[in-house]
């Protein structure tokens, strides 16, 4: 396997750091060399959060250069657009449709862009957008949207379902295990139905 370069992007508080922990654990369990780099930004104030996850036979650096990302997993729609220049020409974006207004929108200095998914598709980019909040509500916990998105991305990540599911089970708190596994499974099922 050639190295996989994954970016997990979102807004503070969406669970992107847990998602990177799950992905890193799964890649390690497959025997890959794994490097993870977390860039928190203004995460506690609702700012952008970016995590690089790289895995493969030999990985020398956790940093992903612009234009070298195989998969962008985005927890917020505008973040998918923000990080688009980092994607390889044949890469894929798997994003939640969730929209969280950034500060310029909150203050009225800007408007949240419309038709983000359509505009990205218009550039010839493979983008797959899902209502992860709906999945999370259906399984009974709105905080599981991040794990549902990992399930939606499973095939694109090059890690088998059993290994990724086991990583979810080992990384989430025991008291929330069943609901997180249900969210992951629902994400996998929805992606397979597409």
Image (cartoon, rainbow, N blue to C red):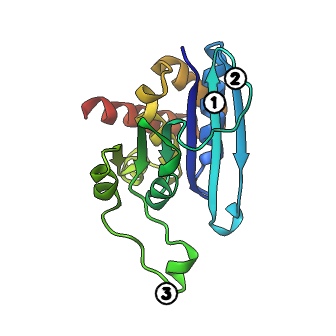
Distance, label 2 to label 1, CA atoms, is 7 Å
Q: Secondary structure at mark 2?
A: loop
The disc, 2 or 1, on the residue closer to the chain's N-terminal end is: 1
Q: Nearer the viewer, residue 4 or 128?
A: 4
Query: Is residue 12 visible in this depiction of the protein?
Result: no
Rendered position, 6 above or below 58: below
Look at the numbered discs 2 and 3 and tell me whether their residues touch, using CB distance below 8 Å: no
Distance, label 2 to label 3, CA atoms, is 44 Å
Q: Secondary structure at mark 3?
A: loop
Look at the numbered discs 2 and 1 and tell me whether their residues touch, using CB distance below 8 Å: yes
Distance, label 3 to label 1, CA atoms, is 38 Å
Q: Secondary structure at mark 1?
A: strand
User: Would you name the residue on which mark 3 appears?
Assistant: 108
Q: Quadrant of the C terminus?
A: top left
Q: Quadrant of the N terminus?
A: top right
Q: 22 left or right of 190?
A: right
User: Would you name the residue on which mark 2 appears?
Assistant: 59
Location of residue 55 by image quarter: top right
């Amino acid at each position: 396997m050639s190295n996989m370069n994954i970016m997990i992007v979102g807004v503070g508080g969406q669970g992107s750091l847990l998602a990177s922990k799950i992905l890193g654990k799964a890649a390690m369990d497959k025997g890959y060399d794994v490097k993870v780099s977390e860039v928190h930004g203004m995460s506690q104030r609702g700012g952008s959060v970016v995590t690089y996850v790289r895995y493969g036979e030999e990985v020398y650096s956790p940093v992903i250069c612009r234009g070298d990302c195989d998969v962008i997993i985005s927890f917020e729609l505008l973040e998918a657009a923000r990080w688009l220049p980092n994607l390889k020409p044949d890469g894929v974006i798997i994003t939640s449709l969730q929209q969280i207004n950034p500060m310029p929108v909150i203050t009225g200095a800007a408007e949240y862009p419309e038709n983000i998914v359509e505009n990205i598709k218009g550039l010839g980019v493979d983008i797959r957008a899902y209502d992860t909040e709906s999945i999370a509500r259906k399984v009974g916990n709105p905080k599981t949207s991040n794990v549902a998105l990992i399930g939606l991305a499973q095939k694109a990540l090059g890690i088998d379902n059993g290994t990724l599911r086991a990583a979810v089970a080992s990384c989430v708190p025991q008291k929330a295990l069943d609901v997180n596994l249900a969210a992951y499974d629902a994400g996998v099922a929805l992606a397979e139905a597409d």
